[in-house]
Amino acid sequence: MTSKHFAYCFAALLALLQFVASVNAFEECFATGFQSRQLQAFLIDHTRHFNNVVSNLASKAAGSQIQITEIKIVGESAAKETHSIVQVSWTIQGAPEVKVSSFELLLEITYADGFVEKAPAKTTGNVRSSRFEVPTLHRFANQPAAEMKSFKVSITANSSETTTKQISL
């Protein structure tokens, strides 16, 4: 079992233990006669807490080598006035023997009407930022234009690792 697999298993075990602790606390509160609103608030709070714990543990277990440092709108497109330029920047940390040959990026823009625009890009391994030209507003027939609401970026590093061993006779 690799250290990464062990970390995933360990994170899952910790999340399960946290969930069991929440269930035990729920049983104690239920036995003391919770009101309906109190019970609903308790469940919502503990569900959020559980989701946060699982999310944090998974991200720590994965040990991501890529850190996204910036996602911002840097201006209007010079080529198309109806488009904005979104810049994404990142850093990467890893062993020197691992060479990153390229990055694959996927920018997802969610508009106020719920529409999701996906913009893929590919860069070389020495680049640490990329710009996307995306529609500023989402327009759909007989609907008012919807503004950008949120961004989500996924970055995949394509790498190769070289190991060399020399022995003397």
Image (cartoon, grey):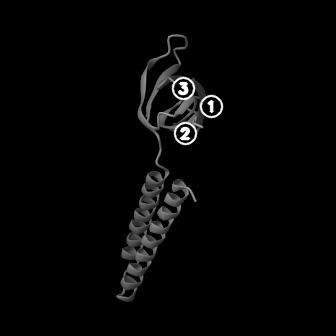
The reply to whether dot 1 and dot 2 touch (C-beta < 8 Å) is: yes
Identity of the residue drawn at 48% across and 64% down? 10
Give the CA distance from mark 2 to mark 3: 36 Å
Image spot of residue 109 (x, y percent): 53, 35
- Does 158 sit left or right of 71 as displayed? right
> Which numbered mark, 2 or 3, is in the foreground of this view?
3
In this view of the protein, can residue 111 be seen by the observer?
no
Residue at the extreme top of the image, as rendered:
78
Q: Quadrant of the N terminus?
A: bottom right
Where's residue 164, x and y in %? 57, 35
Dot 3: element:
loop
Dot 3 amino acid type: Gly
Q: Image height check: is 41 above or below 96?
A: below
Q: Residue at x 53, y 18 (%)?
A: 82
CA–CA distance in space, label 1 to label 2 = 10 Å
Kindly state the secondary structure of the residue where label 1 is placed: loop
Q: Marks 1 and 3, Cα distance to the nearest angstrom? A: 38 Å
Which residue lies under the disc numbered 3? 125
Which three-letter amino acid code belongs to the residue tagged 1?
Phe
* Res 140 label: 1
Viewer-nearest of discs 1 and 3 = 3
Label annotation for residue 81: none
Looking at the image, tell me whether mark 1 or mark 2 is earlier in sequence order: 2
Q: Return the x and y of residue 162 as percentages of the image width and height.
A: 58, 34
**Disc 2: which residue:** 113
Task: Name the one closer to the observer, 160 or 73.
Answer: 160
Q: Residue at x 36, y 87 (%)?
A: 33
Q: Position of residue 147 (x, y in %)?
A: 49, 32
**The quarter of the displayed image where residue 24 is located:** bottom left
Instruction: Give the mark count.
Output: 3
User: Is 142 or 165 nearer to us in this picture?
Assistant: 165
Name the residue type under label 2: Asp
